[in-house]
Amino acid sequence: MPKYDKADIERRMQGAVESLKGDLSGLRTGRANTALLDPVVVEVYGSMMPITQVATISAPEPRMLSVQVWDKANVNAVEKGITKANLGLNPMSDGQTIRLPLPDLNEERRKELAKLAGDYGEKAKIAIRNVRRDGNEALKEDEKKKEISEDDQKRLADEVQKLTDKYVGDVDAAVEKKVQEILTQ
């Protein structure tokens, strides 16, 4: 049974791109985005939970996030979690609702965020290249076991490289789009 599986390689490369898009959605641009609070964890009921498991997050205005805490006893814990996440947000409590006004981004912060977007892109590219390496190793192993011919190994290695190029291009496009969004908002 050959070790090389094109569908698995493509799925893993696609996963790297999707993970990157999730990371990029958490970067703050000028607009309020509920994904900004995804990394926030809150200590409630004696354990750490993602904020989405104790509250509803919405963006009622372009420069404001609203966090509706389900249990009034958890409001202080949610505020502490948001503050600890170090997102540069100042929570304002209003009963069971916490409002988070988004401050304007200064030029220096925009450049930092653009650089961070580039770093996320580089990590995604590394993940894609690791998948390519795994695919090429599987092909060499299959050829060694005489399960595929040398010509098939070379042809399939070219296929893996084309997939790699395609997904690296997707990463570059996603990062470029996010950087433009950050710098122009």
Image: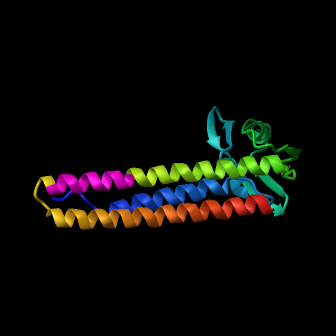
Tell me residue 32's x, y (percent). Answer: 79, 58
Q: Main secondary structure of the magenta part?
A: helix
Tell me residue 139's x, y (percent). Answer: 23, 57
Look at the picture and state if 114 lies above or below 83.
below
Instruction: Give whichever of 10, 45 is nearer the camera.
Output: 10
Residue 144 in the magenta stretch? The answer is: no
The colouring scheme, among rainbow, by chain, secondary structure or one colour, is rainbow
Query: The C terminus lies in which quarter of the figure?
Result: bottom right
Residue located at (69% from left, 59% from top): 179
Tell me residue 25's x, y (percent). Answer: 66, 57
Report whether 107 appears left or right of 41. Answer: right
What stretch of residues is rendered in magenta?
131-143
Instruction: Give whichever of 66, 63 is nearer the camera.
Output: 63
Report whether 138 appears left or right of 110. Answer: left
Q: Does the rendering let one see residue 38?
A: no
Look at the picture and state if 92 lies above or below 173.
above
Based on the displayed image, in which of its 4 quarters is residue 163 positioned? Answer: bottom left
Residue located at (47% from left, 58% from top): 15
- Residue placed furthest toward the top: 46
Residue located at (75% from left, 50% from top): 111
Tell me residue 118's x, y (percent). Answer: 62, 52
Query: The N terminus lies in which quarter of the figure?
Result: bottom left
Residue 134 in the magenta stretch? The answer is: yes
Look at the picture and state if 56 lies above or below 61.
above
